[in-house]
Amino acid sequence: MVDRPNKPTALATTPGLPPQPQVNFSHSNSRVSAALPTGESVEILLYGATVISWKNRFGIERLWLSDAAKLDGSKAVRGGIPLVFPVFGTAPDHAASSKLPQHGFARNSRWEFLGKSSSESTSPSDTSVKLDFGLSSATLDDATKSKWPYTFSIIYSVTLTPENLSTSIVVTNDGDQPFEFQTLMHTYLRIDDISKIQVSGLEDSEYVDKVDAAKAKTQSGAISIIGETDRVYTPAKGPSTPVVVSEEGEAVFSIVRDNLKDVVVWNPWTDKAAGMGDFEPKDGFKKMICIEAGSVNGWTTLDPGDAFEGAQTISD
Ligand code: TA6
């Protein structure tokens, strides 16, 4: 196939059926996008397997992406859904992860596109498409492997339906020694006005307040964002209890989890946004809130041959 830059490459679907999900490569095969016949779409950068766009059927973007986000593979994407693995933040006291960069290497590694599966349906309203991406110790660059020398493989799946977007991760220990990891989906949700936002579903949950000397606190009532906010919640209710982002009292996002026991709520506010070179516009913090599903309190141990699976589903 002649590979012309930015030439989208439609992947075949079964002929004779009504319109089906379309999956295309673009930007010199560095991005994969999918669109449903009902209009919803998603776009993923192979760099970091980072979801950089999720649009509803009206073409409205649901994720926040910085105007200065690097999409050329030169650094982790500021926005969308960067994937955090095998460490959340930095872990100087955790010997096995202490050499890794902030949030680990998954979000700044080149992933492989493993393929698509779509529900070939006669009814456009119940179509869906799942895109699978892979990263393993075999495809990791040598420098990173030297910092985290475990034998692993990850399949990261992005599933788009007319109602929601799901991202799931399956981590497998393919080696002969156990390893510990943390993982998180660092979702930047697009909103209209942070001053009109309330987050519910985390009431009575314990959290670590990273903007108040990492003090342990308990959430009272719904969360309003009135300044820099950086909290690691251990939800008091189960993962199937939605975390709901409401704007002027109307629910705009609902997030449920599977086997991701923690939720991080983050907004950088004025000063932190000003200090991030790839955060533009500088008042963009008013238009985003991060609700991040993960397993980041403590460490998950994966024994040889075992697998870990975690997922989030964001409904809008
Ligand atoms: O998830 C919140 C957080 O850990 C914040 O502390 C802040 O560091 C944010 O992630 C962004 O991190 P990054 O490395 O992408 O600048």
Image (cartoon, rainbow, N blue to C red):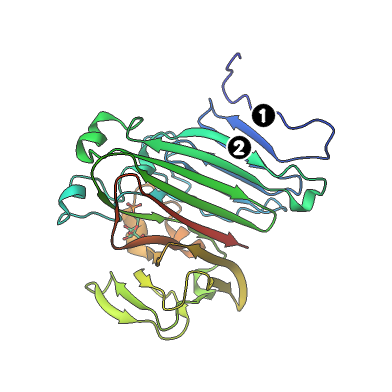
For discs 2 and 1, the disc positioned in front in the rendered view? 2
Quarter-wise, where is residue 215 in the image?
bottom left
Residue 314 position (above or below residue 7):
below
Name the residue that disc number 2 marks. Answer: 116
> Amino acid under label 2?
Lys
Whether the residue carrying mark 2 lies under 8 Å from ligand 1 is answered with no
Q: The C terminus is located in which quarter?
A: bottom right
Residue 199 position (above or below residue 181):
below
Point out which mark residue 11 bears.
1
Task: Please state the total of marks drawn on the protein image.
Answer: 2
Q: Distance between the Cα atoms at labels 2 and 1?
A: 9 Å
Packing grade of label 1 (10 A; few <14, some 14-19, many >=20) is few
Question: Is the residue under label 1 in contact with that under label 2 (CB below 8 Å)?
Answer: yes
Q: Where residue 290 sits: x, y (%)?
A: 45, 62
Instruction: Find the residue positioned furthest to the bottom.
Output: 220
- Left or right: residue 42 compared with residue 146: right
- Left or right: residue 186 compared with residue 85: right
Residue 81 visible in the picture: no
| Residue name at image x 61 percent, y 72 percent | 251
Residue 202 visible in the picture: yes
Instruction: Find the residue positioned furthest to the top.
Output: 2
Query: Reading the chain from its start, which is encountered first: label 2 or label 1?
Result: 1
